Image (cartoon, helix red, strand yellow):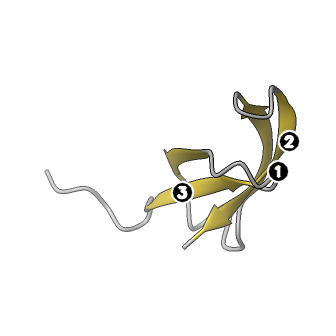
Amino acid sequence: MARSELRPIVKLRSSAGTGYAYVTRKSRRNDPDRLQLTKYDPVARKHVLFREER
């Protein structure tokens, strides 16, 4: 079964400027806008805002 385009792969890039990124899937139906999550940045060694990159 093929992967659906309803849940595309997105890259979350750190807003701290360290270049660290998480890769995840998101639901286009529930989150049509760009995703923003607070996650841990191991380079900055603290929780920072991660924004969706296309």
Q: Position of residue 1 (x, y in %)?
A: 13, 50
Q: Is residue 18 left or right of residue 6?
A: right
- For marks 3 and 1 on the same chain, the one whose residue lies earlier in the sequence: 3
Q: Residue at x 80, y 56 (%)?
A: 15
Q: Position of residue 30 (x, y in %)?
A: 66, 61
- In the rendered image, which residue does mark 2 sit on? 48
Q: Residue at x 45, y 59 (%)?
A: 7
Nearest to viewer (mark 1 / mark 2): 1
- For marks 3 and 2 on the same chain, the one whose residue lies earlier in the sequence: 3
Disc 3 crowd rating (10 Å Cα; few below 14, some 14-19, many 20+) is some
Q: Position of residue 52 (x, y in %)?
A: 66, 63
Total number of numbered discs in the rendering: 3
Nearest to viewer (mark 3 / mark 1): 1
- In the rendered image, which residue does mark 3 sit on? 11
Q: Amino acid at mark 1?
A: Ala
Q: For the C terminus, give its image quadrant.
A: bottom right
Q: CA distance from mark 1 to mark 2?
A: 7 Å
Secondary structure beneath dot 1 equals loop
Q: 46 and 7: which one is in front?
A: 46
- In the rendered image, which residue does mark 1 sit on? 16
Q: Amino acid at mark 2?
A: Val
Q: Is residue 23 left or right of residue 36?
A: left
Q: Amino acid at mark 3?
A: Lys
Secondary structure beneath dot 3 equals strand
Q: Residue at x 85, y 32 (%)?
A: 47
Q: 34 and 40: which one is in front?
A: 40
Q: 29 and 41: which one is in front?
A: 41
In contact (CB < 8 Å): disc 3 and disc 1: no
Q: Position of residue 53 (x, y in %)?
A: 60, 68
- For marks 1 and 2 on the same chain, the one whose residue lies earlier in the sequence: 1
In contact (CB < 8 Å): disc 1 and disc 2: yes
Q: Is residue 30 left or right of residue 11?
A: right
